[in-house]
Image (cartoon, rainbow, N blue to C red):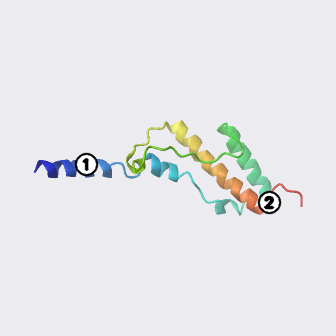
Amino acid sequence: MRWNLVVLLSCLAMAGCVGTSIAERQDANVQSSLQYDSVPCDQLLAQRNALAQRHRLPQDAKPSFSDPGVGLGPFTPDTRSEAQREVEQASGRIDAMNRSIARRECGKPG
């Protein structure tokens, strides 16, 4: 009986982490660059530069990933501050914009 209770409580604790683990939230920062392909190059460059400046990030920012330990990522709660999550989300957006810019060769004389 006690063993069943321990297993049940462990399962409930793990289920409570779904959607709020650091691994899931960091994975969500990686965005598709295709969403920016319809934005004209000059506007996209301006948007990227403004986003980087607003969050004090370099124009070549990329999303970062922490290493909570082997196999523990889905169970490690996200303890980052709201401000830090916003900065990391902006890094993902900047990276997606940069991939669209590179693919379309925006800003190159041609």
Count of labels in the image: 2
At 16% from the left and 49% from the top, the residue drawn is 5
Residue 79 lies in what quarter of the image?
A: top left
Which amino acid is tagged 1?
Ser
x and y, in percent, of residue 14 in the image: 31, 50
At 53% from the left and 46% from the top, the residue drawn is 65
Q: Residue furthest left?
A: 1
> Around disc 2, counting alpha carbons within 10 Å, would you say few (fewer than 14), some (14 to 19), or many (20 or more)?
few
At 48% from the left and 44% from the top, the residue drawn is 67
Left/right placement of residue 93 relative to residue 4 reads right
From the viewer's perspective, is residue 92 above or below residue 35? above
> Around disc 1, counting alpha carbons within 10 Å, would you say few (fewer than 14), some (14 to 19), or many (20 or more)?
few
Give me the disc on residue 105: 2
x and y, in percent, of residue 96 in the image: 65, 55
Residue 40 lies in what quarter of the image?
A: bottom right
x and y, in percent, of residue 100 in the image: 71, 59
Going from N to C along the chain, the mark reached first, 1 or 2, is 1
Left/right placement of residue 59 relative to residue 21 reads right
Element type at mark 1? helix
At 43% from the left and 45% from the top, the residue drawn is 69
Left/right placement of residue 36 relative to residue 21 reads right
Which quarter shows the C terminus? bottom right
State how far apart marks 1 and 2 are (Cα).
51 Å
Q: Are marks 1 and 2 in contact (CB under 8 Å)?
A: no
Q: Residue furthest front?
A: 70
x and y, in percent, of residue 9 in the image: 22, 48
Element type at mark 2? loop
Q: Residue furthest right?
A: 110
Give me the disc on residue 67: none
Give the residue pinned by disc 1.
Answer: 10
Which amino acid is tagged 2?
Glu
